């Protein structure tokens, strides 16, 4: 049983910033995410997409934002359960909650913060009759370890940032990389599109467009795919086929937790603390809804800050917390170290 003060469902930007705000209140956090790494959509779908509405950053790449948030909250030593989906929730006699994942990992906390973005993500799969027969037998929908493809023939399908980025990266890892997209135009970042074109010209990536993978074949594991390219259909040998068509957001099992749901989002009381209809369970970031809601990372940060104040009162009933500005009090780490804020120098006027 993993025990913590605040159990955060979702390790995207809002969830990661919650760790920092909770840490300032001396509250410990543990995060659950179905994806194999923190960052949510920022890491999985568009790591090289520029974001322009983060305070103090005129422009920051989504992947870099994740890195900065991880660096910021590292001092508060959060725990992570990654690659597992929050499945069930059970309220205990003492008012705490036990959340169990699809792999049976149990977590207990007096406060649960659902920061799942648009929900849990499931890969969008190509419509191929027998594709399930080759899943984990040469077909993968998420690249977890690039070294897994060392010296292999890899075919990637897709036209977004993930397909472009991984084609570029694996061009130095795999023996062969082929990128297939149904259109000549790509949806990814211009720099990535230009880099793929350069690698194609250098003979390091084979680019087949407009084309579509319509079949897979092999004995026990994938050995080839069937490509439809204009009026022609042909087979192409491979060791791995990686369709990167993005991830489909769904609330998943959270939708069965007894929460008020409106248009695939969780209703919260935004007049107070973003608490749901179940006391002790909060929803922050894109996963929630209320009058005037804006689905912005900036709004998620604001909601996380207010939520942590309410969580403090639940965990420490009757104890008064005096708000301290980090510019004055600094940031106290759990290891006893203290980062002092710079002292202001006041010069008298002669």
Image: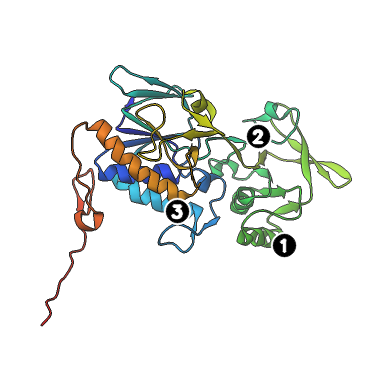
Q: Secondary structure at mark 1?
A: helix
Seen in the image, is 142 located left or right of residue 76? right
Q: Does the rendering let one see residue 259?
A: yes
Q: Residue at x 45, y 53 (%)?
A: 65
The answer to the question of whether label 2 and label 1 lie on touching residues, with beta carbons closer than 8 A, is no
Foreground label between 1 and 3: 3
Q: Residues within 10 Å of mark 1 (few under 14, many from 20)?
A: few
Q: CA distance from mark 2 to mark 3?
A: 32 Å
Quadrant assignment for the N terminus: top left
Q: Position of residue 89 (x, y in %)?
A: 42, 22
Please tell me the numbered disc located at residue 65.
Answer: 3
Q: Residue at x 62, y 42 (%)?
A: 246
Q: Is residue 196 above or below residue 260?
A: below
Q: Kindly identify which residue carries mark 1.
A: 201
Quadrant assignment for the C terminus: bottom left
Q: Position of residue 278 (x, y in %)?
A: 39, 26
The answer to the question of whether label 2 and label 3 lie on touching residues, with beta carbons closer than 8 A, is no
Please tell me the numbered disc located at residue 214.
Answer: none
Q: Nearer the viewer, residue 254 or 178?
A: 254
Of callouts 1 and 3, which one flags the residue occurring earlier in the amino acid sequence? 3
Q: Residues within 10 Å of mark 2 (few under 14, many from 20)?
A: some
Q: Kindly identify which residue carries mark 2.
A: 138
């Amino acid at each position: 049983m993993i025990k913590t003060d605040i159990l955060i469902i979702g390790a995207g930007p809002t969830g990661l910033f919650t760790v920092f705000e909770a840490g300032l209140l001396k509250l410990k956090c543990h995060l659950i995410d179905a994806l194999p790494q923190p960052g949510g959509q920022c890491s999985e779908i568009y790591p090289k997409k520029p974001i322009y509405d983060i305070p103090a950053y005129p422009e920051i790449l989504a992947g870099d934002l994740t890195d900065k948030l991880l660096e910021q909250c590292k001092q508060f030593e959060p725990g992570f359960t990654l690659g597992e989906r929050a499945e069930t929730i059970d309220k205990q006699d003492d008012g705490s909650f036990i959340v169990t994942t699809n792999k049976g990992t149990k977590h207990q906390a007096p406060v649960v913060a659902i920061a799942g973005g648009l929900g849990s993500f499931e890969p969008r799969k190509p419509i191929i009759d027998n594709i399930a027969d080759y899943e984990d037998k040469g077909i993968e929908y998420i690249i977890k370890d690039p070294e897994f493809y060392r010296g292999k023939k890899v075919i990637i399908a897709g036209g977004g940032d993930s397909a472009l980025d991984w084609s570029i990266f694996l061009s130095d890892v795999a023996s062969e990389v082929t990128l297939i997209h149904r259109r000549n135009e790509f949806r990814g970042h211009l720099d990535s599109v230009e880099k793929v074109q350069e690698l194609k010209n250098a003979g390091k990536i084979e680019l087949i467009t407009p084309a579509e993978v319509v079949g897979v074949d092999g004995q026990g594991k994938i050995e080839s795919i069937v490509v439809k390219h204009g009026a022609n259909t042909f087979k192409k040998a491979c060791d791995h086929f990686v369709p990167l068509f993005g991830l489909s957001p769904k609330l998943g099992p959270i939708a069965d937790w007894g929460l008020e749901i409106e248009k695939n989002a969780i209703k919260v009381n935004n007049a107070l603390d973003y608490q749901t209809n179940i006391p002790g369970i909060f929803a922050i970031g894109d996963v929630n809804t209320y009058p005037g809601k804006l689905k912005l990372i900036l709004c998620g940060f604001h909601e996380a800050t207010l939520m942590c104040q309410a969580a403090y009162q639940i965990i420490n009933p009757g104890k008064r917390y005096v708000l301290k500005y980090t510019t004055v009090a600094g940031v106290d780490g759990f290891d006893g170290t203290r980062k002092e804020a710079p002292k202001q120098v006041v010069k008298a006027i002669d």
